Structures are given as C-alpha cells and as structure tokens.
Amino acid sequence: MDPTSLKGHLRNQARRLGFEAFGVVRPDAIPLAAPRLARFLEQGRHGDMEWLARTPERRGAPAGLWPEVKSVILVGMNYGPELDPQRLNGEPERGVVSVYALGKDYHDVIKSRLKALARALVQACPSDVKVFVDTAPVMEKPLAEAAGVGWQGKHTNLVSRQFGSWLFLGALFTTTELPPDTPSADHCGQCRECLDVCPTAAFPAPYQLDARRCLSYLTIEHKGHIPREFRAPLGNRIYGCDDCLAVCPWNKFAQATRELAFAPRAELTAPRLAQLASLDDSGFRAMFAGSPIKRIGRDRFVRNATLALGNAGADAPAELLEHLAGDPSPLVRAAAIWALGRVAPARARLLKVTHAPRETDPEVAEEWQQVA
C-alpha cells in the first residue's frame, strides 16, 4: 500500500479493535517536551517518582528511546464513566476510587489490542514495531496532542473534544513512514475550573503540576507516609483523584465507555471504608486481582483507607482504628494513630500509654507524639 492508504487501513483496524481515537505523529514533533521535563525534574515536582528522572534523554523524544523510529501511532480508548465520578464526595463512610481503576487493568486490555494493530501493520507493510502502554519512557500526552488526538489542558491531562477527559492512550512505534496528522489546538480558553477545584492546590500555574501536592500521586505513587497537611484534604479518596478531570466542561460531549472490561466492579462503586481498611494481604490480593490497584500493595491501600476513616468523623469505627494502630505495617500504624486521634481522641490517648513506648519506627513514634 502507499502510505496514505496504509494509514487509512490502520485507522480502520484500530476502530475494529475498539480504539476510538487514532493519530500519527513524526518522532521529532514534540521538541518542547524534553526541556519541559528537565524543568519539572529540576524543580523536584516529580516527588519520589525516580523513574521519571532516569534516562530523561530517552523520555524526551521517541528517537531517544528508539533511534530507528520513523512514525508514532497514538491510539485512545474511551473509559468515560456512566456514573458521576464525584457522586460519593458527600458520603464519608464510602471510599472514592479513580474512574480509571474501577474495572480491569487498562494496561492489559490496551496492550493486547495494540499488539494486534502492530501485527496488522507488519502484515500490510513489513517493518519493525514496538508497542507501549504507560510502562516505558514515552511522553504519551505531548505525542497525542501532536497527533491530533486531543490537547493537554491546564491540569496537564489530555482533553478530547469528543471524549472529554476520559481517554486511555497507547503508542505504536514503527520504522514505516506514515503521513502525520495535524496537531490539536488548545481549547481551554479562559476556563480554570480544573485548577480551582483541586483540594490541595497542586497546580502552581496553568499547565503546570506539582505532583508532590497531587492526591493521585500521594495515594498511588508515593510509597511513604502521606504528609499531615494533605490528610484532611484527602477526604474519602482512597485511590487517585478525578476532581480536575470531572469538572472539565468538555465532558459534556463525553460518552460512557462501551468497553465491558472498563465497567466498574460492583464492589468498587460505593465501597465501605471500614471493609477496605480491614483487608489483610491475601484479602487485598484476592479482591484486586486483575485490577491496577493491585500494584500499590495492601499496605499503601490500607494506609489510604485508614486516613480516609480519619475524615469520616463520628461514623468511623474506633475499634478498627485501635486494631490498625498495631498493624505490622508502619504506614498503616501511622495512619491509624492520626485517624484515631481525630475521631476518638480520648481513646487515642489511652492507647498511647501502651503502644507508644513499644514503637520502633521513628515516623510512627512521631505520630504518637502528636496525640495530645
């Protein structure tokens, strides 16, 4: 096939595989990505996501990752929610899980289909290919913008005129040259709803994110104790935060996903925090098999749920928090002490007499010191 016909063939194959968005970009189409990444890292805004700082020359441009690449195909799969992502904000005994993690792990769903698209390319035009779904140093969002899939909004996430905030992205690198698409224009205008809704002021300026203040980073990527200043703003969010995505006015054009793999698990549509905070390791693994939540492990997840219980007020089960104050994980113990001190301070003071002298972790010991 000639390049234009081949591109049309691949677009049709992508649609057949369930990809609603498709675009092609040349590997040199994002010249500003590398310097912007460098500034982001220099400012320390990546927090403890050290993988972002490793080999930035490979992340800054597709050719840095694979010098032979001639074209990059960007595909998007809609995961738009049927239910309002903010519907549980006023129910403190329930936990809020980010929309993207309510169903099956998107890595598995998209990668298998992206490999099928790669096979279709190789069959039509023998070439070398590589596929990536959020697990390699690829700047998917700038590439998607350059490929016309959408634009990076003021919250730094991709926005689509057709699907709003809800697109999973995948990238197919190939040594075949394909006609590139026209980059997307920015349609944010004067709107700043995504910036103003952020509960932790994680946006120093439009189009800039300080991950260290972002609840998605703190509940998913951050491996340590969540700083005290962010615990109350956490509310009942236990895995990610969709606030800046959910308020985007472009979501009025969004559609609920038709992909059954992304349908919410029944147990996550309105989960009770007490049940989630009670999970042991085997229970956690069983509950989240095949879910992206599984990768953060039981201790971080229960840390999050326990902190959320500290924001639940009188409805929080003090007995459970007392039990968790003796959990083997320092992350969970510290969260339980803080939560118990908020919902049942008298019980926290009594427990401090027996538990604090035996504590060996310095950060947990500091939590006991904060119990007045």
Image (cartoon, rainbow, N blue to C red):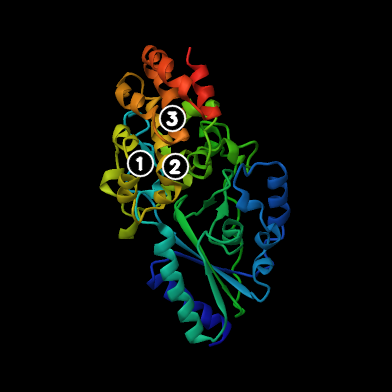
Q: Where is residue 6 in the image (x, y as percent from the top left)?
A: 52, 82
Is residue 193 left or right of 238 when viewed as pictured?
right
Local SS, label 1: loop
Asked if the residue under mark 2 is in contact with the one under mark 1, i.e. CB atoms within 8 Å, the reply is yes
The amino acid on which the numbered mark 3 sits, given as a three-letter code, is: Arg
Give the SS element for disc 2.
Answer: helix
The one of 49 and 280 positioned closer to us in this rendering = 280
* Amino acid type assigned to the residue bearing label 2 in the image: Ala
The residue that disc 1 covers is 84
Q: Can residue 239 be seen in this view?
A: no
Q: How far apart are marks 2 and 3 (CA)?
A: 32 Å
* 289 on left or right of 339: left
Q: Distance between the residues labelled 1 and 2?
A: 8 Å
Q: Which residue is drawn at 34% across and 35% down?
A: 277
Label 3: how many Cα within 10 Å (few below 14, some 14–19, many 20+) = many
Say whether marks 2 and 3 touch (CB < 8 Å).
Answer: no
Q: Earlier in the sequence, mark 2 or mark 3?
A: 2
- What residue would you read off at disc 2? 246
Query: What residue is rendered at 40% in x and 43% in y?
Result: 298
Mark nearer the viewer, 3 or 1: 3
Q: Quadrant of residue 117?
A: bottom left
Labels in figure, total: 3
Front label number (2 vs 3) = 3
Image x and y of residue 347, in percent: 36, 15
Question: Please, what is the three-letter code of the amino acid marked with disc 1?
Answer: Asp
Q: Which residue is drawn at 44% across and 42% down?
A: 246
Q: Is mark 3 on a helix, strand or loop?
A: helix
- In this rendering, is residue 66 above or below 367? below
Residue hosting label 3: 333
